[in-house]
Image (tube, helix red, strand yellow):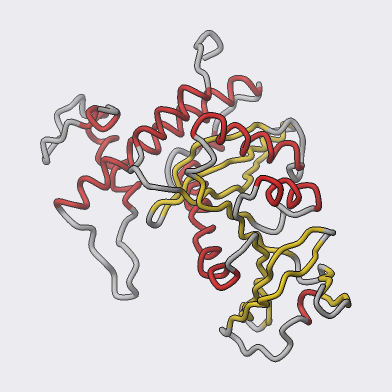
Amino acid sequence: MSCVDLKLEWVSRLIFALIPTEESYVLVMDRTNWKFGKQDINILMLGISYKNMCFPILFKMLDKRGNSNTNERKELINTFIYWFGKDCIDCVLADREFVGEDWISYLNDKQIKYYIRIRNNFKVYLTSKQKEITASHLFNNLKPGQTRQYHKIVRIHNQLCYISRTKVITGNKIDYCIVIGFNKPEKALETYKIRWQIETLFKAFKSSGFNIEDTHLQKIDRLEKLVMLVMIAFVWCYKIGDYIDAIKPITIKNHGNRLISVFKLGLDYLSRLLLSKNEYNPLNINCFGFLSCT
Protein backbone atom coordinates (compact mmCIF):
# COMPACT_ATOMS: atom_id res chain seq x y z
CA MET A 1 0.00 0.00 0.00
CA SER A 2 2.98 2.32 0.56
CA CYS A 3 3.66 2.62 -3.19
CA VAL A 4 0.05 3.39 -4.14
CA ASP A 5 -0.60 7.03 -5.07
CA LEU A 6 -4.10 7.77 -3.81
CA LYS A 7 -5.20 11.34 -3.17
CA LEU A 8 -8.09 12.35 -0.94
CA GLU A 9 -9.33 14.84 -3.53
CA TRP A 10 -9.78 12.05 -6.09
CA VAL A 11 -11.71 9.93 -3.60
CA SER A 12 -13.87 12.82 -2.36
CA ARG A 13 -14.77 13.94 -5.87
CA LEU A 14 -15.62 10.36 -6.84
CA ILE A 15 -17.92 9.96 -3.83
CA PHE A 16 -19.53 13.36 -4.43
CA ALA A 17 -20.25 12.31 -8.02
CA LEU A 18 -21.69 8.95 -6.91
CA ILE A 19 -24.10 10.17 -4.24
CA PRO A 20 -27.63 11.35 -5.09
CA THR A 21 -27.67 14.96 -6.29
CA GLU A 22 -29.30 17.46 -3.95
CA GLU A 23 -29.62 21.24 -4.04
CA SER A 24 -27.81 21.42 -0.71
CA TYR A 25 -26.39 18.97 1.81
CA VAL A 26 -26.41 18.63 5.58
CA LEU A 27 -22.81 18.08 6.69
CA VAL A 28 -22.03 16.16 9.87
CA MET A 29 -18.69 16.41 11.67
CA ASP A 30 -17.49 13.92 14.25
CA ARG A 31 -14.42 12.05 15.41
CA THR A 32 -13.71 8.36 15.93
CA ASN A 33 -10.68 6.81 17.54
CA TRP A 34 -9.19 3.54 18.71
CA LYS A 35 -5.88 2.26 19.98
CA PHE A 36 -3.59 -0.37 18.47
CA GLY A 37 -0.81 -1.21 20.89
CA LYS A 38 0.67 2.13 21.87
CA GLN A 39 -0.55 3.83 18.69
CA ASP A 40 -3.54 6.19 18.96
CA ILE A 41 -5.60 6.25 15.77
CA ASN A 42 -7.76 9.36 15.71
CA ILE A 43 -9.89 10.36 12.70
CA LEU A 44 -11.81 13.60 12.23
CA MET A 45 -14.55 12.93 9.67
CA LEU A 46 -16.92 15.08 7.63
CA GLY A 47 -19.94 13.31 6.18
CA ILE A 48 -22.98 14.12 4.05
CA SER A 49 -26.33 13.21 5.57
CA TYR A 50 -28.63 11.12 3.37
CA LYS A 51 -31.79 9.29 4.44
CA ASN A 52 -30.79 7.21 7.49
CA MET A 53 -27.05 7.26 6.98
CA CYS A 54 -24.08 9.44 6.21
CA PHE A 55 -21.71 9.37 3.23
CA PRO A 56 -18.03 9.95 4.17
CA ILE A 57 -16.65 12.82 2.14
CA LEU A 58 -13.55 14.20 3.91
CA PHE A 59 -11.36 13.25 6.84
CA LYS A 60 -8.17 14.17 8.63
CA MET A 61 -5.90 11.86 10.59
CA LEU A 62 -5.07 13.51 13.92
CA ASP A 63 -1.57 12.69 15.09
CA LYS A 64 -2.55 12.92 18.75
CA ARG A 65 -5.04 11.73 21.34
CA GLY A 66 -8.23 13.56 22.23
CA ASN A 67 -10.32 16.28 20.70
CA SER A 68 -9.82 18.12 17.44
CA ASN A 69 -9.01 21.82 17.45
CA THR A 70 -10.50 24.72 15.53
CA ASN A 71 -7.83 24.76 12.81
CA GLU A 72 -8.36 21.06 12.07
CA ARG A 73 -12.13 21.56 11.77
CA LYS A 74 -11.70 24.66 9.63
CA GLU A 75 -9.38 22.73 7.32
CA LEU A 76 -12.11 20.19 6.55
CA ILE A 77 -14.80 22.82 5.94
CA ASN A 78 -12.48 25.02 3.86
CA THR A 79 -11.46 22.02 1.75
CA PHE A 80 -15.11 21.07 1.18
CA ILE A 81 -15.90 24.63 0.11
CA TYR A 82 -12.85 24.74 -2.20
CA TRP A 83 -13.76 21.47 -3.92
CA PHE A 84 -17.56 21.60 -3.95
CA GLY A 85 -18.61 25.17 -3.17
CA LYS A 86 -20.20 26.87 -0.17
CA ASP A 87 -23.64 27.15 -1.78
CA CYS A 88 -24.23 23.40 -1.52
CA ILE A 89 -23.90 23.46 2.29
CA ASP A 90 -27.28 23.50 3.99
CA CYS A 91 -25.85 23.35 7.51
CA VAL A 92 -23.21 21.70 9.70
CA LEU A 93 -24.11 19.42 12.62
CA ALA A 94 -21.74 18.53 15.45
CA ASP A 95 -21.73 17.22 19.01
CA ARG A 96 -20.51 18.80 22.27
CA GLU A 97 -16.84 18.33 21.38
CA PHE A 98 -17.16 20.87 18.59
CA VAL A 99 -17.58 24.10 20.52
CA GLY A 100 -15.35 27.05 21.29
CA GLU A 101 -15.21 30.75 20.53
CA ASP A 102 -12.90 30.56 17.50
CA TRP A 103 -14.85 27.71 15.89
CA ILE A 104 -18.25 29.37 16.28
CA SER A 105 -16.72 32.68 15.17
CA TYR A 106 -15.45 30.99 12.00
CA LEU A 107 -18.90 29.56 11.17
CA ASN A 108 -20.61 32.88 11.94
CA ASP A 109 -18.14 34.86 9.84
CA LYS A 110 -18.57 32.44 6.93
CA GLN A 111 -22.36 32.60 7.43
CA ILE A 112 -22.52 28.81 7.47
CA LYS A 113 -25.63 27.54 9.21
CA TYR A 114 -24.90 25.16 12.06
CA TYR A 115 -26.64 23.25 14.83
CA ILE A 116 -24.19 22.25 17.55
CA ARG A 117 -24.95 20.72 20.92
CA ILE A 118 -23.41 22.45 23.94
CA ARG A 119 -22.80 21.29 27.49
CA ASN A 120 -25.44 21.95 30.12
CA ASN A 121 -23.12 24.11 32.23
CA PHE A 122 -22.29 26.62 29.50
CA LYS A 123 -22.90 30.24 30.41
CA VAL A 124 -25.42 32.02 28.20
CA TYR A 125 -25.53 35.80 28.07
CA LEU A 126 -29.04 37.07 27.34
CA THR A 127 -28.39 40.25 25.39
CA SER A 128 -32.00 41.42 25.64
CA LYS A 129 -31.98 41.13 29.46
CA GLN A 130 -28.33 42.02 30.00
CA LYS A 131 -27.71 39.04 32.28
CA GLU A 132 -25.90 35.70 32.28
CA ILE A 133 -27.51 32.34 33.03
CA THR A 134 -26.45 28.69 32.96
CA ALA A 135 -27.72 26.97 29.80
CA SER A 136 -29.57 24.22 31.72
CA HIS A 137 -31.51 26.87 33.69
CA LEU A 138 -32.76 28.75 30.65
CA PHE A 139 -35.96 26.70 30.28
CA ASN A 140 -36.54 25.43 33.82
CA ASN A 141 -40.23 24.65 33.36
CA LEU A 142 -39.80 22.17 30.50
CA LYS A 143 -41.36 18.73 30.88
CA PRO A 144 -39.61 15.60 29.55
CA GLY A 145 -40.02 15.43 25.78
CA GLN A 146 -40.91 19.09 25.44
CA THR A 147 -38.84 21.39 23.25
CA ARG A 148 -38.47 25.13 23.32
CA GLN A 149 -36.60 27.81 21.42
CA TYR A 150 -35.31 31.12 22.70
CA HIS A 151 -36.19 33.43 19.84
CA LYS A 152 -33.82 36.23 20.79
CA ILE A 153 -30.12 36.24 20.03
CA VAL A 154 -27.87 35.16 22.89
CA ARG A 155 -24.12 35.25 23.39
CA ILE A 156 -22.10 32.10 24.15
CA HIS A 157 -18.29 32.17 24.33
CA ASN A 158 -18.55 35.77 23.16
CA GLN A 159 -20.31 34.66 19.96
CA LEU A 160 -23.87 35.51 18.90
CA CYS A 161 -26.22 32.60 18.21
CA TYR A 162 -29.69 31.19 18.85
CA ILE A 163 -30.41 28.48 21.40
CA SER A 164 -32.97 25.66 21.68
CA ARG A 165 -33.46 22.93 24.24
CA THR A 166 -35.32 19.72 24.99
CA LYS A 167 -35.54 17.70 28.20
CA VAL A 168 -34.96 13.95 27.98
CA ILE A 169 -34.91 11.06 30.43
CA THR A 170 -32.05 8.57 29.99
CA GLY A 171 -32.56 5.62 32.31
CA ASN A 172 -33.54 7.28 35.57
CA LYS A 173 -31.62 10.47 34.85
CA ILE A 174 -32.91 13.74 33.49
CA ASP A 175 -30.72 15.28 30.82
CA TYR A 176 -30.93 18.16 28.39
CA CYS A 177 -30.13 18.46 24.72
CA ILE A 178 -29.18 22.11 24.23
CA VAL A 179 -28.39 23.17 20.68
CA ILE A 180 -27.05 26.48 19.39
CA GLY A 181 -27.46 27.66 15.82
CA PHE A 182 -26.73 30.40 13.32
CA ASN A 183 -30.42 30.94 12.62
CA LYS A 184 -33.84 29.23 12.53
CA PRO A 185 -33.94 27.98 16.15
CA GLU A 186 -37.30 26.31 15.48
CA LYS A 187 -35.48 23.80 13.24
CA ALA A 188 -32.51 23.23 15.52
CA LEU A 189 -33.55 20.19 17.55
CA GLU A 190 -35.29 18.36 14.71
CA THR A 191 -32.32 18.89 12.40
CA TYR A 192 -29.78 17.99 15.08
CA LYS A 193 -31.45 14.58 15.51
CA ILE A 194 -29.91 13.35 12.26
CA ARG A 195 -26.38 13.86 13.63
CA TRP A 196 -26.52 10.21 14.80
CA GLN A 197 -26.18 9.13 11.17
CA ILE A 198 -22.43 9.60 11.35
CA GLU A 199 -22.37 7.17 14.29
CA THR A 200 -23.98 4.64 11.95
CA LEU A 201 -21.21 5.36 9.44
CA PHE A 202 -18.53 4.71 12.06
CA LYS A 203 -20.21 1.41 13.00
CA ALA A 204 -20.09 0.41 9.33
CA PHE A 205 -16.38 1.23 9.26
CA LYS A 206 -15.86 -0.83 12.41
CA SER A 207 -17.81 -3.70 14.00
CA SER A 208 -20.87 -3.68 11.71
CA GLY A 209 -18.95 -3.78 8.46
CA PHE A 210 -15.30 -3.45 7.55
CA ASN A 211 -13.69 -4.03 10.97
CA ILE A 212 -11.15 -1.31 10.26
CA GLU A 213 -10.05 -1.43 13.91
CA ASP A 214 -8.50 -4.84 13.22
CA THR A 215 -5.88 -3.33 10.93
CA HIS A 216 -2.28 -3.61 12.08
CA LEU A 217 -1.29 -0.53 10.07
CA GLN A 218 0.23 2.17 12.24
CA LYS A 219 1.87 4.59 9.83
CA ILE A 220 -0.38 7.57 9.24
CA ASP A 221 0.08 7.68 5.45
CA ARG A 222 -0.89 4.01 5.09
CA LEU A 223 -3.87 4.41 7.40
CA GLU A 224 -5.03 7.36 5.31
CA LYS A 225 -5.02 5.23 2.17
CA LEU A 226 -6.89 2.44 3.94
CA VAL A 227 -9.56 4.88 5.14
CA MET A 228 -9.95 6.22 1.59
CA LEU A 229 -10.47 2.71 0.22
CA VAL A 230 -13.03 1.98 2.95
CA MET A 231 -14.85 5.23 2.09
CA ILE A 232 -15.22 4.09 -1.53
CA ALA A 233 -16.23 0.59 -0.45
CA PHE A 234 -18.88 1.99 1.89
CA VAL A 235 -20.52 4.07 -0.84
CA TRP A 236 -20.30 1.12 -3.25
CA CYS A 237 -22.04 -1.22 -0.80
CA TYR A 238 -24.70 1.36 0.01
CA LYS A 239 -25.55 1.91 -3.65
CA ILE A 240 -25.84 -1.84 -4.25
CA GLY A 241 -28.02 -2.23 -1.15
CA ASP A 242 -30.20 0.70 -2.17
CA TYR A 243 -30.75 -0.88 -5.59
CA ILE A 244 -31.68 -4.25 -4.06
CA ASP A 245 -34.00 -2.57 -1.55
CA ALA A 246 -35.83 -0.86 -4.42
CA ILE A 247 -36.62 -4.16 -6.18
CA LYS A 248 -36.89 -6.36 -3.09
CA PRO A 249 -37.70 -4.17 -0.06
CA ILE A 250 -36.01 -4.91 3.26
CA THR A 251 -38.35 -6.42 5.86
CA ILE A 252 -39.55 -3.94 8.48
CA LYS A 253 -39.68 -5.37 12.02
CA ASN A 254 -42.54 -4.81 14.48
CA HIS A 255 -40.86 -1.84 16.17
CA GLY A 256 -40.41 -0.12 12.80
CA ASN A 257 -36.70 -0.74 12.23
CA ARG A 258 -35.31 -2.51 9.19
CA LEU A 259 -34.27 -6.14 9.52
CA ILE A 260 -30.94 -5.15 7.97
CA SER A 261 -29.45 -1.82 6.96
CA VAL A 262 -29.17 -0.82 3.31
CA PHE A 263 -25.39 -0.74 3.66
CA LYS A 264 -25.22 -4.22 5.22
CA LEU A 265 -27.53 -5.59 2.54
CA GLY A 266 -25.16 -4.33 -0.13
CA LEU A 267 -22.06 -5.49 1.75
CA ASP A 268 -23.41 -9.03 2.17
CA TYR A 269 -24.40 -9.27 -1.50
CA LEU A 270 -21.11 -7.87 -2.79
CA SER A 271 -18.93 -9.99 -0.51
CA ARG A 272 -20.74 -13.19 -1.51
CA LEU A 273 -20.42 -12.22 -5.17
CA LEU A 274 -16.69 -11.55 -4.93
CA LEU A 275 -15.90 -14.57 -2.76
CA SER A 276 -17.81 -16.86 -5.14
CA LYS A 277 -15.81 -15.50 -8.09
CA ASN A 278 -18.98 -14.09 -9.64
CA GLU A 279 -20.93 -17.36 -9.34
CA TYR A 280 -23.31 -15.89 -6.73
CA ASN A 281 -25.44 -13.24 -8.41
CA PRO A 282 -29.13 -14.23 -8.07
CA LEU A 283 -30.36 -10.75 -9.02
CA ASN A 284 -27.99 -10.54 -12.00
CA ILE A 285 -26.61 -7.20 -10.82
CA ASN A 286 -23.70 -5.44 -12.49
CA CYS A 287 -22.13 -4.43 -9.19
CA PHE A 288 -19.18 -2.65 -10.80
CA GLY A 289 -21.61 -0.39 -12.62
CA PHE A 290 -22.43 1.32 -9.32
CA LEU A 291 -18.93 2.81 -9.29
CA SER A 292 -19.58 4.61 -12.56
CA CYS A 293 -20.25 8.35 -12.43
CA THR A 294 -21.96 8.37 -15.84
In this orientation, which residue lies closer to the viewer: 123 or 90?
90
Residue 179 higher or lower than 207, as above or below: below
Residue 288 higher or lower than 262, as above or below: above
Of all residues shown, which one is farthest toward the right? 131
Left or right: 96 in relation to 54: right
Counting from the top left corner in percent of width and height, residue 30 is at 61, 48
Counting from the top left corner in percent of width and height, residue 88 is at 47, 43
Counting from the top left corner in percent of width and height, residue 156 is at 80, 63
Residue 251 image-quadrant placement: bottom left
Q: Residue at x 75, y 32 (%)?
A: 38
Counting from the top left corner in percent of width and height, residue 47 is at 51, 44
Q: Residue at x 56, y 84 (%)?
A: 145
Of all residues shown, which one is farthest toward the top? 3
In this orientation, which residue lies closer to the viewer: 260 or 155?
155
In this orientation, which residue lies closer to the viewer: 198 or 136?
136
Q: Residue at x 66, y 45 (%)?
A: 110
Left or right: 219 in relation to 10: right
Of all residues shown, which one is farthest toward the front? 128
Residue 174 image-quadrant placement: bottom right
Count numbered badges in the picture: 0
Residue 125 image-quadrant placement: bottom right
Quarter holding the C terminus is: top left
